[in-house]
Amino acid sequence: MLKPLTIGSLALAHNVVLAPLAGITNLPFRLICRKAGASFAYTEMVSVNGLVREGVKTLALLKSSPEDRPLGIQLFGDKPYDLAEAARMVEGYGDLLDINMGCPVRKVVGTGAGSALLQDPLKIAAILRAVRAATTLPLTIKIRSGWHCGDNVYKEVGRIAEAEGCDAVTLHPRSRSLMFSGQADWDQLAEMKGALSIPVLGSGDLFTPDDCLRMLKETGCDGIMIARGALGNPWIFRQVRELEQSGCYAPVGTVERADTISEHLKLFIEELGEAVAVREIKKHIGWYAKGFAGASEIRRTANSAHSIQDILTLTERMRSIPDTLGHTPD
């Protein structure tokens, strides 16, 4: 089920990629996930309005490195001209361009962008036509099923995307109204795959390696995009490969968790400076510190950390915690 994935002119080693996540998929986190085995990663969502009006400040979100390629850039906006202009501005910063048409959060849909676009397929067509004319990069979109439950426009939007020159479509099979509640309807992925000739990637409810292989097997989608399942769990990319190859995967112990926190912290310091690094890593420790005895205490201690040394002392405490078999409530 794991196999090479080709999206336009872009050839990926395999078909398990890291999704764009606002406030999360900055350069340090992307590098952590790539080291764990992600074949591809995206920037955070980048505002087209920010690019067109603020320029340099917003371009800072596109900071990358040679180890961070190939890189997808995800834009959000609702005006064809602005999206096309933004596409031209970012073309030299990445290897693929994605238009977000699935984000459900209020501050995005309130501008007419994200999943709000699913209410207007004609506008989607105009956007994709304009962006396709503006860039030679592989072009993709990420969508949801529709705006309301039962208002399923995903196949119509997928066909529009294919007709307007998109190279792939990613579907999170939930409506905007569901936000992240309920269960993603993976049957819609199979239907989308049957309706299109371009690659279809699946997203939604991918929290374990078993989930990942099951989505590939049950839906026939060409690849999967892991989002929330990678939070505090970059090893999921490695474990998916292990599971397919051997039928099992190695659990992650407290020493590896501590080592990853230390590495993540170092990357944050290099990119953002010590003060911001402490604030950012505390957020991630809230995800890393789960599933082992004493994890809740580690999280509480992290919340009160004020310095780099506080974090490093915390990782030493984690290393001293013995691993236990199976899941440990925290």
Image (cartoon, rainbow, N blue to C red):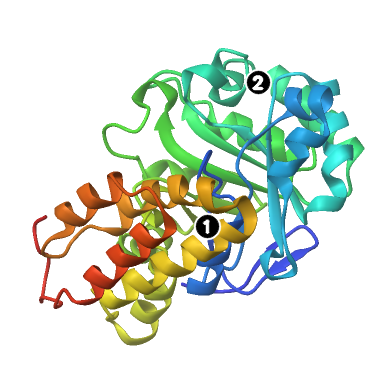
Q: Residues within 10 Å of mark 2 (few under 14, many from 20)?
A: some
* Residue 293 falls in image quadrant: bottom left
**Can residue 83 be seen at all in this image of the molecule?**
yes
Q: Nearer the viewer, residue 249 or 274?
A: 274
Between marks 1 and 2, how big is the CA–CA gap? 34 Å
Q: Nearer the viewer, mark 1 or mark 2?
A: 1
Q: Is residue 245 left or right of residue 78?
A: left
Q: Position of residue 270 (x, y in %)?
A: 62, 61
Q: Residue at x 71, y 65 (%)?
A: 69
Q: Which mark is residue 88?
A: none
Residue beneath disc 2 = 121
Judge by depth and name the residue closer to the eye, 147 or 32: 32
Query: How many labels were placed on the picture?
Result: 2
Residue drawn at x 58%, y 72% is: 14
User: Is 284 rendered above or below residue 181?
Assistant: below
Report which quarter residue 109 is drawn in. Answer: top right
Q: Position of residue 198 (x, y in %)?
A: 67, 52
Q: Are marks 1 and 2 in contact (CB under 8 Å)?
A: no
Residue matched to label 1? 29
Q: Secondary structure at mark 1?
A: helix
Residue 222 in view (yes/no): no
**Regarding mark 2 in the picture, which secondary structure is present there?**
helix
Residue 253: image location, x then y, percent: 25, 76
Task: State the residue lying farthest toward the bottom.
Answer: 246
At label 1, counting other C-alpha atoms closer than 10 Å, the crowd grade (few under 14, some 14-19, many 20 or more) is many
| Residue type highlighted by circle 2 | Pro
Left or right of 6 in this view: 119: left
Label 1 amino acid?
A: Phe
Q: Earlier in the sequence, mark 1 or mark 2?
A: 1
